[in-house]
Amino acid sequence: MITKEQVTKLVEDATKDTDVYLVDLKIASDNRITVYLDNSTRITIDECSKVNKFIDEHLDRDIEDFELTVSSPGLDEPLKHIKQFHKRMGCQLGVVLKDGKKEVGKLVGVNENGIVLEQKSKEQVGTKKSRQTVIHNNELMFDQIKEAKLVLTF
């Protein structure tokens, strides 16, 4: 069986000295290999095609047949790599925490430990009866996050 380690190494070799990085890799029991790539700007079809060709040339179909798909993660796919968070600065994220709590806010900070979401809420401030918009920065550690996705607005 083709292993994740084999394919990961091939992706690393194919993307060496480029801005392209591996986001996710799935290998099904029937050898359907799915590779998700990204970069700091916008991954192109040509970049995915080059990696696809490289992997295809370095795995032997005579030994073990496989199906290979190399693409960018879709907009509805969870963010998995810290570089993806950096790329999405200023975007709205929906975050599900491991405890089940859901957070939504604008991504305003990323570091090696986690992210910062800017969240707005209507609150009564002081003795005034009217409610005002208050902005809070909510720090979330990566080890608290189960899933983070872009919130698409039309």
Image (tube, helix red, strand yellow):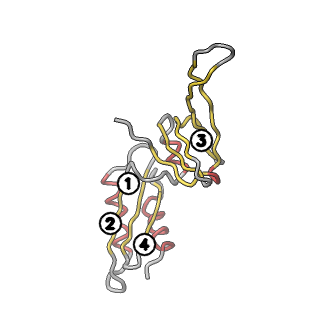
Marks 2 and 3 sit apart, C-alpha to C-alpha, by: 34 Å
Q: Which mark is residue 53?
A: 2
Q: Which mark is residue 110?
A: 3
Disc 4 residue crowd, few under 14, some 14–19, many 20+, Cα 10 Å: some
Marks 4 and 3 sit apart, C-alpha to C-alpha, by: 30 Å
List the residue tagged with mark 4. 27
Q: Of circles 2 and 3, which is in front?
A: 3
**Which is more N-terminal, label 3 or label 4?**
4
Q: Which mark is residue 72?
A: 1
**Which is more N-terminal, label 2 or label 4?**
4
**Which is more N-terminal, label 3 or label 2?**
2
Marks 4 and 2 sit apart, C-alpha to C-alpha, by: 17 Å
Residue 93 horizontal/vertical position (percent): 49, 41
Look at 38% across and 77% down and name the residue there.
Answer: 31
Look at 60% across and 55% down and name the residue there.
Answer: 98
Q: Amino acid at mark 1?
A: Ser
Decide: marks 1, 3 in contact (CB < 8 A)? no
